[in-house]
DNA sequence: TCGCCTAATTTCATCGATGAACAAACGAGA
DNA sequence: TCTCGTTTGTTCATCGATGAAATTAGGCGA
C-alpha cells in the first residue's frame, strides 16, 4: 500500500487501456459518447493504476477551480461556525469545495484577502469584513466574483447580503425596555472598527432605542470587547457587576459573549432574568441549551448562507445581473434569560 | 473597479515592465537575484495590471498545492471546531491553506475521502475516521501523505496521532466512582460504528471500569447517540431521567452532549452535581462557562493538532521516517458538575 | 584594453488535462 | 454498391508558471 506512485496521468491510464488520454478524459467526464466496452477497459485501468485526476491541471485548462473562499473573522465564534457549516452545505449543491480563511478581524488580513494574497485561486469569494468599511472601495478592484456579508459597506458595484443589524438591535433593546428594565447595558462595543461593522451598528441602534425611550446610557454601561469571545463576555459582565450601580439588563452583541456573561452571573449567584436579564444575538444552537436558555435575535443565518452562495453562483455563471443587495429577516426568539 | 480582466499573466506583466515572464517570476518568488530597479518596475506593473498569481499553474508545475485537507465527521461538534481551528493555526506556520471536508461519520464518505474522490488535489490529508476501522486497510492505497487522528485503527504503515481514549474514559469513570456514585450511566454509545472508534473505546473503558469496581451496568444506562450533538445529549438525559431508577451520575462521551444533558437537568430542576453528576469529554472552551462549569477530560487537542501537522509536514518533505504513532496526554479537569 | 568571473536575464521545454477540429469506423437507406 | 450521417476516438495546441540551462551584461584586476 501507499505506493510512491509518482503521479499517474491520463496518458498512463490510456496506454494501459489501449486508448488516448483524451478518451480517458471523455470516459471520466462522461461528456462524449464512449463505447461501453472501452469505458470498462478505461475504468479498470484507472482502478489498477490508482489514477487520480490532477485538479491543478484541470483548473489551469478550464479556468475553474471548483473552490470558493469564505473569509470570516474567526471560526471559533459560534455564529461563524454555524455560518461556515451552512455555507459548506449550500456550496455542496454547486459541487464546490469551501476554503475558510480567518481574518482575525484585522484590517491588514482583510485587505490581503481582497487583494488575493492570502487566497487560494478560487472561483469566488464570500467575505464578511469587519475592519474594512466605506472608503476602502479601492481594494475591491479585480474582485468580480464577490459577495459581501454583513452590512452594505461598499458603494461600489458589489453583491451584498445584509443582515438587518439595526432593526434587530432595536428589537432586542426595545424588548428589554418593554419588560420594564431601566438600567440597560451593552457588551461588545469596539471603537476601533468601521462604522458599518456589526459592532458599530448594533451599538448605535442600542443607543438610539434607549434615547427614544428617554433612558440614559452611562458611558460605563457600554462595555468594549474586541474579540467577542466567551471570556470577553464574562469579563464584560464582571466589570458591569463591579459598578456601584450595576445594570438590570444586558444586551450582548453576540451569543458567545452572552454565554460568558451568563457564566459570570451564575458564578456570583446573580439570578437571571430576575436580577439581571440577558439577551444575545445570533441564535446559535447552544442558545437553546444554556441555563437559563438564552433569549436572542435570530438573524436568518440559513438565509444568509443560501443567498450568498446562490448570488455567487450567479456571478460565476456570468449572468450579467447588476450587483444587488439582499436583506435577510430577523426576529426575536424569546426564551428564559430575558 | 471590478474589472473583467480576463486573467493577467506574468507575460503581460513582463511586457509592461520590459522583461520576460521568467523575470517576473523571479521577482515575485524572490529566489534569484534581480536588480532593484527591475524589481521596482515589475512590482509597479504587477500593481497597475492587478496581476494575481495563478495557483493552478504553479501547482501543476511544482507539484505542490499549498493546501492540506482536514477530514472530520462534523464541524458543528465543538471538539472538531476547536480541532479545525488549531490545525488551521498550525498549518499557517507551514504556509498551508486548510480545506475542511465533513464526512458526516458516514462510511461511504470516509472511503471517498481516502480514494480522493471527495478531495481537492492537496499536499496531504489529516483524517479522523469514524466508521472505518481495522480491515479497511485497502482504502489506504495511494495515500502516502496521510495522518490518521483518533485511535490506531490501521495496521498498515500510516502515521497515527492517538488520543488515549481508553485511559481517559477510565479516568472519568473512576472519578465518578471515587466520588461515591453507584448508579452511573453513559451517553454516546454507537453500536453501528467500528470497534476502534471513540464511541466504542470509551464505552468499553466505561464498562470495564465499572466492572472492576463491582458496579452493575444495566442496559438502559447505556444510551445510544449517533450524532453526539446537543440534542442527542438532551434527549439521552431525558430518557435516563424517565427510568424508574435514574442514575446518579452520567458520563457523556463528549462535551457537546454534556451541554445538552445539563440543559435537560436544569429544565427539570434536577440539581447538578448533587442529584446527578455530569462529566464530559473534550474540554472545549464552552465547558468552562456552563452552569455549573463542566468537569471533563482534557484530551490534549493542542498537541493533537501540532503533532498531526508536524508529522504531515515531515511526510511531505519526504523524510523517510517509518510511520509512527504518537500519543497525546490526557487529564481530568475537575470543575463543578461532578 | 583584454579576459574572466559573477550577476542578471532569457530561452525552452514541461507539468496534466481539455477545447476544437478532424479522422476513422460503422450503419442505414437508396 | 455508394453516399451520407452518426458514433467513437484521435491529434494538436493550449492554459500559466517554473526548472534547467544558456546567454548577456557588468565589474574588476592585470
Image (cartoon, coloured by chain):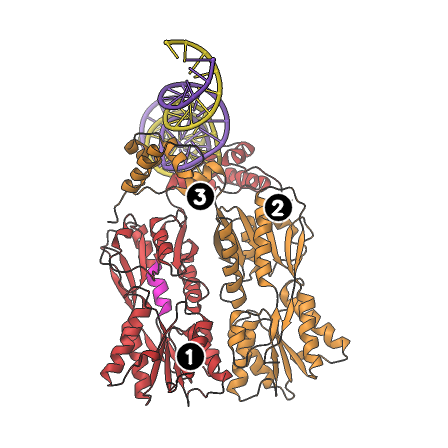
Chain colours: A red, B orange, C yellow, D purple
On what subunit does the disc labeled 3 rest?
Answer: A
Is residue A313 shown to the viewer in this render? yes
Residue annotated with mark 3: A29
Using the numbered discs, state the Cα–Cα distance from disc 1 to disc 3 in whole angstroms.
Answer: 61 Å
Tell me if A222 is positioned left or right of A268 in this view: left
Indicate the quadrant where residue A84 lies.
bottom left
Residue annotated with mark 1: A239
- Residue A101 rendering spot, x and y as whole percentages: 42, 56
Indicate the quadrant where residue B46 lies.
top left
Q: Using the image, tell me which numbered label, if any, was put on residue B268.
A: none
Q: Can marks 1 and 2 be said to lie on one chain?
A: no
Q: Is residue A301 magenta?
A: yes
Using the numbered discs, state the Cα–Cα distance from disc 1 to disc 2 in whole angstroms.
Answer: 57 Å
Q: Is residue B155 magenta?
A: no
Q: Residue at x 77, y 80 (%)?
A: B214
Residue A303 or residue B10, whichever sits in front: B10
Residue annotated with mark 2: B141
Q: Magenta residues?
A: A300-309
- Residue B305 rendering spot, x and y as whole percentages: 56, 58
On what subunit does the disc labeled 1 rest?
Answer: A
User: Does residue A256 lie above or below A37 as drawn?
Assistant: below
Amino acid at each position: 500500500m501507499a505506493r510512491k506512485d509518482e503521479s499517474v496521468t491520463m496518458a498512463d491510464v490510456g496506454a494501459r487501456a489501449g486508448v488516448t488520454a483524451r478518451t480517458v478524459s471523455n470516459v471520466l467526464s462522461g461528456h462524449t459518447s464512449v463505447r461501453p466496452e472501452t469505458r470498462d477497459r478505461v475504468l479498470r485501468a484507472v482502478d489498477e493504476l490508482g489514477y487520480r485526476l490532477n485538479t491543478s491541471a484541470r483548473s489551469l485548462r478550464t479556468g475553474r477551480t471548483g473552490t470558493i473562499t469564505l473569509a470570516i473573522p474567526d471560526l471559533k465564534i459560534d455564529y461563524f461556525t454555524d455560518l461556515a457549516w451552512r455555507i459548506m452545505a449550500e456550496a455542496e449543491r454547486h459541487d464546490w469545495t469551501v476554503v475558510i480563511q480567518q481574518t482575525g478581524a484585522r484590517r491588514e488580513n482583510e485587505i490581503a484577502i481582497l487583494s488575493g494574497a492570502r487566497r487560494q485561486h478560487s472561483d469566488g469569494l464570500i467575505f464578511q469584513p469587519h475592519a474594512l468599511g466605506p472608503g476602502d472601495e479601492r481594494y475591491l478592484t479585480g474582485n468580480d466574483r464577490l459577495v459581501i456579508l454583513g452590512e452594505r459597506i461598499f458603494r461600489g458595484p458589489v453583491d451584498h447580503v445584509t443582515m438587518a443589524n439595526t432593526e434587530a438591535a432595536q428589537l432586542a433593546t426595545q424588548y428589554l425596555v418593554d419588560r420594564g428594565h431601566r438600567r440597560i447595558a451593552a457588551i461588545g462595543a469596539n471603537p476601533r472598527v468601521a462604522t458599518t461593522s456589526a459592532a458599530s451598528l448594533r451599538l448605535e441602534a442600542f443607543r438610539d432605542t434607549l434615547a427614544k425611550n428617554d433612558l440614559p446610557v452611562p458611558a460605563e454601561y457600554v462595555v468594549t470587547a474586541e474579540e467577542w469571545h466567551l471570556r470577553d463576555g464574562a469579563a464584560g459582565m464582571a466589570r458591569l457587576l463591579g459598578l456601584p450601580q450595576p445594570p438590570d439588563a444586558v444586551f450582548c452583541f453576540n451569543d458567545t459573549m452572552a454565554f460568558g456573561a451568563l457564566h459570570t452571573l451564575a458564578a456570583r449567584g446573580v439570578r437571571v432574568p430576575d436580577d439581571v436579564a440577558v439577551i444575545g444575538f445570533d441564535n446559535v444552537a447552544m442558545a437553546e441549551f444554556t441555563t437559563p436558555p438564552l433569549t436572542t435575535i435570530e438573524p436568518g443565518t440559513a438565509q444568509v448562507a443560501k443567498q450568498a452562495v446562490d448570488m455567487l453562483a450567479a456571478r460565476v455563471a456570468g449572468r450579467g445581473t447588476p450587483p444587488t443587495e439582499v436583506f435577510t429577516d430577523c426576529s426575536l426568539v424569546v426564551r428564559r434569560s430575558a
